[in-house]
Image (cartoon, helix red, strand yellow):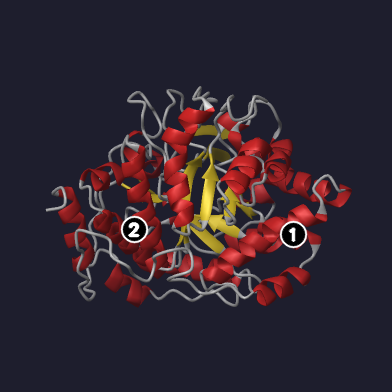
Amino acid sequence: MRGRIGMAGALVVTLAACGGGGEAAGASRAAERSSDGARSAATGTAGATPARPAGETAGPGPGDGAAQGRVSARPGDVRRVLAGMSLEEKVGQLFMPVVYGTAASTVSGENQARYGAQTPAKVVAKYHLGGVILFPANVKSIGQVVGLTNGLQKASPEVPLLIGTDQENGLVSRMGALMTPFPGAAQVGATKSTALSRAVARATGEELRALGVNLDFAPVADVNVNPNNPVIGRRAFGDDPAHVSRMVSAAVKGFADADVAATAKHFPGHGDTDVDSHTGLPVIKHTRSQWERLDAPPFRAAIASGVDAVMSAHIVFPRLDPSGDPATLSKPILTGLLRGKLGFKGVISTDALNMEGVRKKYNDGEVAVRAVLAGADLLLMPNDFPKAYNAVLAAARSGRISGQRLDESVTRLLTLKQNRGILRGAPAASAAKAAGVLRSAEHRRLAARVARGGR
């Protein structure tokens, strides 16, 4: 975590997401530990939910395939919402920043300094945000988080929010103070059981949904082929592309079972780097054939399994794009490879735009504009939010970002919301119901089974 003095003399703490070297910051030093550091399990009250058997093979179920286990999007509804939006509202849909506080009504100097609005609710309303990402500093108790997510949704009555977090489990567990401490991807991968991968994702999704969180920036689809990788490591399911593909596919289906949007990350593959993109700009020297063999398979598997979103990586991949721009700003990579070659039709999210890996060549406004022009739909955590928002708005007004290009991204975001059942109205979370889901006996048994290697 890195701190600096920002506007209005407030202590501005840089939040680095999604996953890896950064961690959220709050008022207390407890929130300042690294997300890749050891995380002790917080105690909580466990409720009970009906037991669900977990077999050793992943059989057909509600989440199998892109069309199963989902609410079918009604294109007419998406078009109708899109047609009623102003340009400012369309631009706002592209953004998912951090907000500061544990309630939608919390008055925070951070919110005022960063957004010119005192409370999370006012930030949402001011910029017509498409979503908000939560960090440990937003998390105190089950009832508090439920109140926060419900309050945030009330601040966006016209188009409900995507409320996201990084809950990979293991090393990156933003909601870990409340949720079942499931082992991370490496331990899940070591079981060799796709059924357990799916079950853990489903249980994670159920707990997130109970809190009012509807999008998880997981699973990690990187193949960790470099043992010196400082940012992926045990966040990956393993170092074999075929094995990682199977586990990623199962996890995507598990999140769909829970009706939570899943995000495969970090495209085109962050597994073979010895530089952390939170603090530098990694260069991956794989040839195109190596990429096809090592990096692409898990993303292909995620797409085939109906993944809702794919997150870009702040990495330079010269054999895929010789421009020197990171993948997040690369049209050949995001539009050419991910959209064109792999056929992905869902939401492309950037990794956090406050990370150094994406800010080496361009200012914060230009980074946001170039990400959209490259093919990104969701702009996550801009370092200077007003500069990024106003730059995208100006580019849309001038035609640099065409009306068609903007509508494509907004349509994808609205369609994701429709697919997850929140376009017509976000479901209100219930603290009482959440208390019976989080750290339930069933989920704790599942976590223990994975920790035993699947036995």
Determine the secondary structure under disc 1. Answer: helix
Tag on residue 407?
1
In the image shown, does 224 or 339 lie closer to the viewer?
A: 339
Point 38% across, 27% down: residue: 229
Image coords of residue 182 (percent x, y): 26, 53
Q: Which mark is residue 324?
A: none
Residue 369, position in %: x, y?
73, 42
Is residue 323 visible in the rendered image? The answer is yes
Query: Which residue: 67% across, 76% down?
Result: 77
Hey, what amino acid is under mark 2? Ala
Question: Where does residue 155 sit, x and y in percent of width and height?
Answer: 62, 69
User: Circle 2 sits on which residue?
Assistant: 201
Q: Mark 1 belongs to which amino acid?
A: Asp
Q: Nearer the viewer, residue 279 or 110?
A: 279
Residue at figure coordinates x 24%, y 44% from the top left: 187
Crowding at mark 1 (Cα within 10 Å: few <14, some 14-19, many 20+): some
